[in-house]
Amino acid sequence: MSEFAPPPPKVRVTKAQLRKQQEAYRLAEQLAEDHKAEEEAEKLTEVQKLEQKIDDVF
């Protein structure tokens, strides 16, 4: 019995699989950026509404 573990099995990934995975990551990143921009726009409108209410009070 050896104290070392056997090497992990070789995993073969085709270029098509790699491209598909990279495309999925790119799309996920793009969606995250889009969502981030939408959230910033919503927060900006909320801030403007609150500033308007403050101006109305004073």
Image: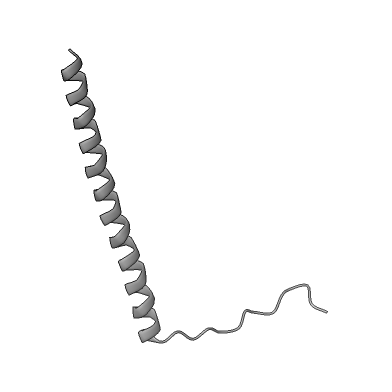
Kindly give the residue lying farthest to the right in the view shown: 1
Residue 43 position in % (x across, y down): 26, 38
Task: Indicate left or right for 20 with 57 as reference.
Answer: right
Question: Vertically, is 40 above or below 14?
Answer: above
Q: How many marks?
A: 0
Q: Nearer the viewer, residue 17 or 46?
A: 46
Question: Vertically, is 27 above or below 39?
Answer: below
Residue at 29% x, 53% y is 35
Scheme of image coloration? one colour
Task: Indicate left or right for 1 with 52 as reference.
Answer: right
Residue at 20% x, 37% y is 45
Question: Vertically, is 50 above or below 57?
Answer: below
Q: Nearer the viewer, residue 51 or 25?
A: 51
Q: In the figure, residue 24 lies in which quadrant?
A: bottom left
Q: In the figure, residue 1 lies in which quadrant?
A: bottom right
Residue 44 position in % (x across, y down): 22, 37
Residue 2 position in % (x across, y down): 79, 77
